[in-house]
Every structure is written in structure tokens, then in C-alpha cells.
Amino acid sequence: MSSTDLFKYALVLLLPAAYFASRFLRSTTLPTSSASSAAADNPVKSIMQAPRDDLAPPKDDPFTLVQLKEFDGSDSSKPIYVSIKGTVFDVSAKADVYGSGKSYNIFAGKDGSKGLGMSSLKEEHAVSDYSELSDAERKVLDDWHAFFSKRYNVVGRVVDLPVPVKREREASSENPTPAPNPSSDL
Ligand code: HEM
């Protein structure tokens, strides 16, 4: 058998194996269900990084979406930030995945909540307006928020989220401002 034939046979055997390995990794690493996010917190069963117990107290520094762009990993002297639902996380410790040209750089220097909820790495989905996500996608997004909260320091919050997201937040607020009483003279 020539070395070219050998190479072809190796490809035929290896490609399906690689496909199933990637399917397996996906099912055990992405918070697409509560079961997988529970696995993500277990350092023994999961290949995801373990939660940290040395996180700094969260900061509340204000960021506009434009200011956030500075921290997209393109300047290695600056930290890398990822925002989820307006919470800004410092992910510099994982420059190997969020740095320039790396697999999850799409989420760096921005709020890509919609893409996280959709489990999408497409540029057009990596935007902060997640108001059109389904309930299941919102659950995935909330799982990512919980995942990041246990692993990365919070350095601030985005102050100019798009109007639909702001409206939703106000509508779901636990302590809504009472509606004015039309019969009152005050
Ligand atoms: C075949 C598809 C995929 C495979 C094999 C895969 C594999 C992985 C692996 C191995 C990690 C751990 C990386 C590390 O800790 O160094 C990871 C983390 C992650 N993946 Fe994926 N992934 C896939 C698709 C996706 C998609 C579509 C998204 C879009 C939301 C995504 C988002 C993430 C995020 C946000 C992390 C967390 C990184 C961190 O901060 O620790 N992945 N993935």
C-alpha cells in the first residue's frame, strides 16, 4: 500500500472520530441545558475551567458600548472585557480564547448577549439586544452569565444598553414605581 493510500484510509477513519469528539465536547461544555452547565461547574467531569474562589468584590464602573471596544484584545497591554446582559467581566486570564484571532474573540470588547443566548459565533449575532431571544435561549444566556460570574471579576456595567433591553429590565423590576393615581390631586 502506498503512503497516499495509507493517508486516505487514515482520513476516512479519523474524520468521523473527530466529528463525534467535537459533538461530545459541545454537549459537555456549552450551557445549552441546566445539566451541561452543572457539569461545567464540576472540574472533575468537565473540561471547562473550574469556578474560582478568589474573585475580587464586583466593581460598578460605567462603560459605554464604544468605551468597551477598547478592551477587545487587539492591544495586548490592555485587559480584555466581555459584557453579558450589561455586566462587564475581565476575561484577560483567558486571552488564549478571547484574545485577538482566538476562537471566542467575537465576544471581546462588546456585549454579545444575543449570540451567547443563541449559541452562535456569528458576527451579526454578537450584539447586546437580546430582547428577541426565546425563553430557552434566555435560559442559555442566564447560564452563561452565571458561568462568568463564578469565574471572572466584574469590573463594571454597560450604561447604554439598547432601548428594548432597558424596557424589559424596567418591566421585570421587582420594585416597580407605583403608577400615579389619576384621581389624586398630588
Ligand atoms: C463544535 C463546537 C464547539 C466546541 C468543540 C467547543 C469547545 C469548547 C471548549 C473546549 C471550551 C473550553 C475552552 C477553555 O477553557 O480553554 C469552550 C468554552 C466556551 N465555549 Fe465553546 N465550543 C463549541 C462551540 C461554541 C459555540 C457555538 C459558542 C457560542 C456561544 C461557544 C462558546 C463558548 C464559551 C463562551 C466558552 C467559555 C470560555 C471561558 O471563558 O472559559 N462555544 N468551548
Image (tube, helix red, strand yellow):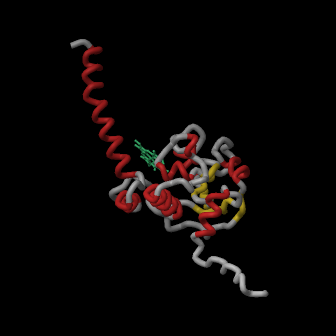
Residue 112 point in image, percent of width and height: 58, 50
- Pick the quarter of the image with the C terminus: bottom right
- Give above or below for 46 relative to 15: below
* Residue occupying image coordinates x 40% and y 59%: 37
- Give above or below for 112 relative to 175: above
In the picture as drawn, the residue positioned furthest to the top comes out as: 2
Residue 148 point in image, percent of width and height: 52, 59
Residue 50 point in image, percent of width and height: 44, 59
- Pick the quarter of the image with the N terminus: top left
> Which of the two residues, 103 or 92, is positioned nearer the viewer here?
103
* Residue occupying image coordinates x 61% and y 53%: 128
> Which of the two residues, 8 or 180, is positioned nearer the viewer here?
180
Task: Count numbered badges in the picture.
Answer: 0
Residue 46 point in image, percent of width and height: 36, 55
> Which of the two residues, 139 or 83, is positioned nearer the viewer here?
139
In the picture as drawn, the residue positioned furthest to the left comes out as: 1
- Drawn side of residue 14 relative to residue 120, left or right: left
- Give above or below for 17 relative to 76: above
Q: Is residue 96 visible?
A: no
In the picture as drawn, the residue positioned furthest to the right comes out as: 186
* Residue occupying image coordinates x 66% and y 78%: 177
In the picture as drawn, the residue positioned furthest to the front comes out as: 183
Q: Is residue 14 visible?
A: yes
